[in-house]
Image: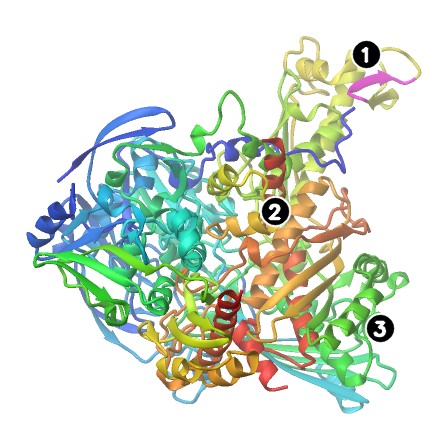
């Protein structure tokens, strides 16, 4: 009984979603609720000369109109960033509503609050803003050019930070002494996250109690409360409750503290009525933090035997107009540290420059830094294989860190704890039937068809840790997690976690974990998440940390529960604690038939008559904080087969094989689903997705009419499998599965298309036109 | 000027006065509190707001309530009929949903497909989902769910 | 997401609709609403009055006459796709309808609405041009018929007068010697045509006696490509002839260039789509 680990249990959260009874923020209705409409800048860069609110304020149904200065006058501080990169990082103020200048299209200028969304929108059209348009910097080269307009006066060269990691001298020496150097210049394009649920916020101030409840579609409710209270508004934290109810996908974009959260929290107190704001999709396109956007030059040195001897990387990272919550950490610590990949490269040096432009802020997006690093490496391995006349599989294997080398410390500070890269690659090759594939490819070529095979052997670092390291690398918060178990008197259990589920199925996986270890039926376990009033603390969900870090905290709390339950059982059975054995839901005195069930223990924990109160307190509830000893390191091997339409350049994905090692798996069905979704996102970047701005900073891909994402007909069935190398340093052996697909798929697909065309490179996204152009230039 | 509209939603008749500009999705969500129908975009692309009107799947963000006078509307809340609809059941069985936001619209698109093509091929299913975006699942399990439901129905 | 406020009236008949249209300075016709409402929701369009014609039964029927089929203006893309009459007598039209947008759009969008809106990337215009369809309209001055070649004037601009209404579109019944096909390269985001080419051919004893080519998506308005038509007329329409006649089908400088495709790529796609459409049409006509 209660054997739940490794079982594809159907999700407990599904019933409410398939019957239309999910509870997303925009579904919530509060009596006397008002609706906010934010007037946003149509310019990428302009000075605000004046704002005339009178006409808008007099429109029917309008309750209030506020501008940026109103918040400043009320002592509302700018929104801080959460990651310090270097001592002289420029962190110019990010106001909730722009005060002096607007710095990207979509920057908030004023808010109209009205009795209905429609009335607020109608009134917004009456608001007069007098802008003085300024020159905008859009591309990073333009931002760095001599005499370029400044996004912020406080960043005189439009540079927020510069950063370097690794041994520059050793790397330069490796390049100088190399038998061969592969050089790669790449653009990792801007992506727009587009969770299908647009962001939504409700601020609800109760002036009788002084309490503020903030509902927000966030991956990270506790951090939002902390930033809101401690840094932005000064509101007393114990009077603020942040609830993230059902959230319709995040992919990173809902980690961050956004202006609309501050605005609704502030405005509800001003008007003493609830205030709801829900993004229109066109607003999401100009306000959700976007992803990637790197320009990189890299050089990889090889010796005569095909071994990598050094890697030198210089990256410009677009920060957009303001530093979002994690912004600086993404193209630095979450990117540079991953540049060893699966390879035993002895010398690596990486330089990153974070640059301000008049575009939407850039921050973590599914993978966050790691896809950018993996793309660079995996593309370079393929390009080098071509230049060196070697098979891409063989070149990878030659450079793999061997399974007997773990723990392995890379030249970019990570210590990989475990891995078996050959095993995953072997399995993927077996599933794909590599030799047959190459034969099929040759036959296809003879018929004039362009078929390509692509590889990606990747490493990921999940669950940023430990907190001391996070602090040393500039994260302004430790990255532990809390988990609390409350056993009710009847033996039913509620589990409280500081991570948040917005599609990952935590309500199922975590219930499996707890039920398994408490040896009780899963139906008796319920997960509570996304509410600061119920959960002690948490750091939210991102970086595939939920199970490895949040799950480990819960495991620790389970251990505490069982320790105490054993003590209670010993008391009740009048035996020594060390003689108590817990098996199949019963506490038994070893070697006897005297036993008591879990539910009985729970009941006596709450209604005892005879506890030695000094030694045994009533109650059965424990909180645990877990600080991981290290990152976890999922890895894997992906293989794709594509065919390029010789007339149009369209790419069809014929097959996609993925073998991932995410450590111990609690629910295989859910892990497979995470991998599928991740692959789709990675394919999106490879072939379709592109956030484009024109030279004036106007977004050209500002709606679903222009921004392409994978649809059902664009994707094949995925062939997925796993190897299992448990994480050695956390109690459940899990590593994280939410981002592997995204990290691996992008270079895998680009490699396949380049292989099909036998070209060195095609810039992403590989739209039909770009592929067609590449065919022309062959 | 408001207009009187008679509309049957999930077998319940309603007679309401509505502003002409009110969208069907606003009527369902704001007036009737049927929040299972979602809004994911403003350009009629994402399909999160799909409902069935007089037997056909439509995007309720691109239909005015006044246009539905005399119509019969089924939203996700009207799918259960003494138990889960086979599509609802299949989405759960095949893990065809993650965050759940696109799910009601996906199910509605699938209802329409299966109503005129009871045993669609994988390719036909994928094409029938052209008006729906899912960002979580990669569609793999959605396709399998629809195949499963087709077999069950 | 909600449009600006407007007045709304449900027309009981075409005459009724014309009265309402005549009575307002700023009225628009609402049929399926799948072109108009998206624009209104983004507040790119804000008419004072919508005249809802969707209840007018007379505009819904599709009928066959001796040499043509008349498709009612309110026929949805879905109903055109599924219509037995269309499938029997003008099958390529059904195929075009089945490829418009997505299933939900096809369930609501109408042929009359699509043509009146005249999106330069819509699918129907190419086939309306290639099949030389006739657009019947009613207005305050009575009825008139507009030839396809006179209908599309520019970007979102047609020969339709402000207070006129499309009532039906007449397509020829395709004879056994005729073939028609539409090849489209869809914008992967919007599903509108980056380039769509429709071809109609008549083959008599292995020789092309007539041909028309309609193009959509590529330029600011749907248009015919008469120079290529002339080059094809009188030939055997074999693969080599089609290939050479469609080489340089459309000069890049006459085409649109945007995120969906540069001028050069559109020009290339015109050639590819033209070849596909012509080849399929010839195969049908020769079968």
Colour scheme: rainbow
Q: Whole-percent x and y of residue B17?
A: 19, 32
Drawn side of residue A599 relative to residue C79, left or right: right
- Residue at mark 2 shares a chain with residue at mark 1: no
Q: Residue at x 73, y 21 (%)?
A: A615
Chain of the residue under label 3:
A
3 vs 1, front mark: 3
Q: Which of A154 and A408 is in front in this view?
A: A408
Mark 2 burial class by Cα count in 10 Å: few <14, some 14-19, many 20+: few
Circle 2 is placed at which residue position?
Answer: B121
Q: Which residue is drawn at 26% across and 41% down?
A: B67
The magenta stretch is A584-590
2 vs 1, front mark: 2
Circle 1 is placed at which residue position?
Answer: A573
Secondary structure of the residue carrying tag 1 is: helix
Chain of the residue under label 1:
A
Do the numbered discs 2 and 1 sit on residues whose CB atoms are within 8 Å? no
- Residue at mark 3 shares a chain with residue at mark 1: yes
The circle on residue A394 is 3
Secondary structure of the residue carrying tag 3 is: helix
| Residue A160 makes an appearance in the image | no
Mark 3 burial class by Cα count in 10 Å: few <14, some 14-19, many 20+: few
């Amino acid at each position: 009984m209660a054997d739940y680990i490794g079982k594809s249990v159907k999700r407990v959260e599904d019933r409410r979603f398939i019957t239309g009874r999910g509870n997303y923020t925009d579904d919530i209705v509060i009596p006397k609720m008002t609706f906010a409409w934010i007037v946003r800048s149509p310019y990428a860069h302009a000075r605000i000369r004046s704002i005339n609110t009178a006409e808008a304020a007099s429109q029917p149904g309008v309750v209030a109109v506020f501008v940026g200065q109103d918040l400043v006058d009320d002592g509302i501080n700018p929104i801080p960033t959460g990651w310090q990169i270097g001592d002289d990082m420029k962190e110019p103020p990010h106001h909730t509503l722009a005060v002096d200048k607007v710095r990207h299209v979509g920057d908030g200028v004023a808010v109209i609050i009205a009795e209905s969304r429609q009335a607020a929108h109608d009134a917004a059209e009456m608001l007069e803003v007098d802008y003085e348009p300024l020159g905008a910097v859009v591309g990073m080269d333009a931002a760095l050019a001599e005499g370029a307009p400044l996004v912020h006066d406080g960043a005189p060269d439009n540079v927020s930070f510069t950063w370097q990691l690794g041994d520059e001298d050793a790397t330069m020496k490796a390049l100088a002494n190399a038998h061969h150097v592969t050089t790669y210049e790449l653009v990792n394009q801007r992506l727009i996250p587009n969770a299908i649920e647009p962001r939504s916020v409700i601020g609800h101030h109760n002036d009788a109690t002084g309490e503020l409840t903030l509902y927000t579609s966030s991956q990270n409710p506790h951090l939002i409360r902390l930033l809101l209270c401690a840094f932005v508004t000064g509101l007393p934290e114990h009077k603020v409750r942040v609830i993230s109810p059902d959230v319709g996908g995040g992919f990173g974009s809902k980690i961050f503290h956004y202006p609309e959260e501050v605005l609704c929290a502030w405005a509800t107190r001003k008007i003493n009525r609830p205030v709801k704001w829900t993004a229109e999709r066109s607003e999401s396109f100009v306000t959700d933090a976007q992803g990637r956007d790197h320009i990189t030059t890299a050089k990889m040195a090889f010796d005569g035997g095909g071994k990598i001897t050094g890697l030198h990387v210089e990256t410009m990272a677009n920060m957009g107009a303001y530093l979002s919550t994690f912004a600086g950490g993404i193209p630095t610590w979450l990117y540079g540290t991953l540049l060893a990949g699966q390879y035993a490269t002895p010398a690596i040096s990486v330089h990153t420059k974070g640059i301000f432009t008049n575009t939407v802020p850039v921050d973590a997006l599914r993978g966050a830094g790691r896809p950018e690093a993996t793309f660079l490496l995996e593309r370079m391995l393929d390009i080098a294989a071509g230049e060196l006349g070697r098979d891409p599989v063989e070149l990878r294997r030659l450079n793999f860190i061997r399974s007997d080398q773990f723990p392995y410390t890379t030249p970019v500070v990570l210590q990989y704890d475990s891995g078996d890269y050959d095993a995953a690659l072997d399995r993927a090759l077996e599933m794909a039937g590599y030799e047959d594939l190459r034969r099929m490819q040759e036959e296809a070529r003879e018929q004039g068809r362009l078929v390509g095979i692509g590889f990606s052997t990747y490493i990921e670092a999940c669950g940023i840790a430990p907190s001391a390291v996070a602090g040393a690398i500039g994260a302004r918060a430790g990255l532990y997690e809390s988990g609390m178990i409350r056993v009710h008197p009847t033996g039913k259990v509620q589990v409280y976690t500081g991570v948040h589920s917005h599609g990952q199925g935590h309500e199922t996986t975590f219930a499996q974990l707890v039920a398994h270890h408490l040896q009780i039926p899963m139906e008796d376990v319920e997960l509570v998440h996304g509410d600061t009033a119920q959960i002690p603390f948490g750091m939210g969900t991102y970086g595939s940390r939920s199970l490895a870090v949040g799950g480990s905290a819960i495991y620790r709390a389970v251990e505490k529960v069982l320790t105490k339950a054993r003590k209670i059982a010993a008391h009740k059975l009048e035996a020594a604690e060390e003689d108590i054995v817990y098996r199949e839901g019963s506490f038994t005195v070893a070697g006897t038939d005297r036993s008591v069930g879990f539910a009985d223990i729970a009941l006596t924990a709450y209604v005892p008559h005879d506890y030695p109160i000094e030694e045994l307190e009533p109650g059965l509830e424990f909180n645990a904080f877990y600080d991981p000893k290290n990152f976890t390191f999922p890895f894997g091997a992906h293989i794709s087969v594509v065919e390029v339409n010789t007339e149009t350049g369209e790419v069809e994905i014929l097959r996609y094989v993925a073998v991932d090692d995410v450590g111990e798996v609690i629910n295989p069905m859910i892990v497979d689903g995470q991998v599928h979704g991740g692959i789709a996102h990675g394919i999106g970047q490879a072939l379709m997705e592109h956030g484009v701005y024109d030279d004036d900073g106007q977004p050209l891909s500002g709606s679903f009419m222009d921004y392409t994402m994978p649809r059902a007909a664009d994707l094949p069935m995925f062939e997925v499998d796993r190897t299992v190398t448990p994480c050695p340093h956390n109690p459940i052996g899990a590593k994280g599965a939410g981002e592997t697909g995204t990290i691996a798929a992008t270079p895998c697909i680009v490699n396949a298309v380049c292989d099909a065309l036998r070209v060195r490179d095609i810039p992403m996204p590989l739209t039909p036109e770009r592929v067609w152009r590449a065919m022309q230039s062959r | 000027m408001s207009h009187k509209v008679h509309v049957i939603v999930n077998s319940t008749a309603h007679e309401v006065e509505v502003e002409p500009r009110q969208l069907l999705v606003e009527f369902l969500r704001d007036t009737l509190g049927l929040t299972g129908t979602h809004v994911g975009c403003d350009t009629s692309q994402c399909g999160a707001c799909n409902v069935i009107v007089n037997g056909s799947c439509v995007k309720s963000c691109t239909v005015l309530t006044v246009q539905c006078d005399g119509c019969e509307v089924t939203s996700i809340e009207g799918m259960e009929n003494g138990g889960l609809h086979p599509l609802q059941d299949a989405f759960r069985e095949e893990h065809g949903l993650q965050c759940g936001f696109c799910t009601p619209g996906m199910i509605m698109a699938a209802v329409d497909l299966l109503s005129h093509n009871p045993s669609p091929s994988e390719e036909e299913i994928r094409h029938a989902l052209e008006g729906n975006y899912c960002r979580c699942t990669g569609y793999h399990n959605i396709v399998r769910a629809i195949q499963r439901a087709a077999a069950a129905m | 997401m909600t449009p600006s406020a407007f007045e709304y009236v449900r027309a009981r008949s075409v005459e009724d609709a014309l009265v309402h249209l005549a009575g307002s300075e700023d009225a628009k016709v609402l049929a399926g609403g799948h072109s108009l409402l998206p624009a209104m929701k983004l507040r790119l369009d804000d008419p004072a009055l919508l005249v809802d014609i969707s209840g007018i039964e007379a505009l819904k029927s599709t009928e066959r006459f001796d040499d043509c089929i008349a498709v009612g203006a309110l026929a949805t893309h879905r109903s055109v796709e599924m219509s037995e009459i269309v499938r029997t007598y003008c099958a390529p039209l059904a195929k075009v309808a089945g490829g418009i947008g997505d299933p939900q759009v096809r369930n609501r969008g109408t042929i009359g609405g699509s043509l009146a809106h005249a999106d330069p990337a819509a699918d129907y215009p190419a086939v309306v041009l290639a099949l030389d369809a006739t657009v019947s309209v009613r207005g305050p001055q009575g009825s008139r018929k507009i030839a396809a070649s006179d209908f599309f004037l520019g970007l979102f601009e047609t020969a339709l007068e402000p207070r006129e209404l499309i009532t039906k579109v007449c397509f020829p019944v395709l004879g056994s010697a005729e073939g028609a096909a539409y090849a489209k390269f869809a914008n992967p985001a919007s599903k509108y045509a980056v380039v769509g080419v429709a071809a109609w051919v008549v083959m008599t004893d292995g020789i092309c006696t007539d041909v028309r080519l309609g193009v959509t998506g590529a330029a600011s308005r749907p248009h015919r490509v008469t120079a290529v038509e002339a080059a094809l007329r009188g030939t055997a329409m074999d693969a080599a002839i089609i290939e050479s006649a469609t080489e340089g089908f459309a000069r890049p400088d006459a085409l649109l260039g945007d995120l969906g495709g540069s001028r050069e790529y559109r020009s290339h796609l015109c050639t590819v789509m033209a070849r596909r459409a012509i080849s399929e049409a010839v195969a049908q006509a020769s079968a």
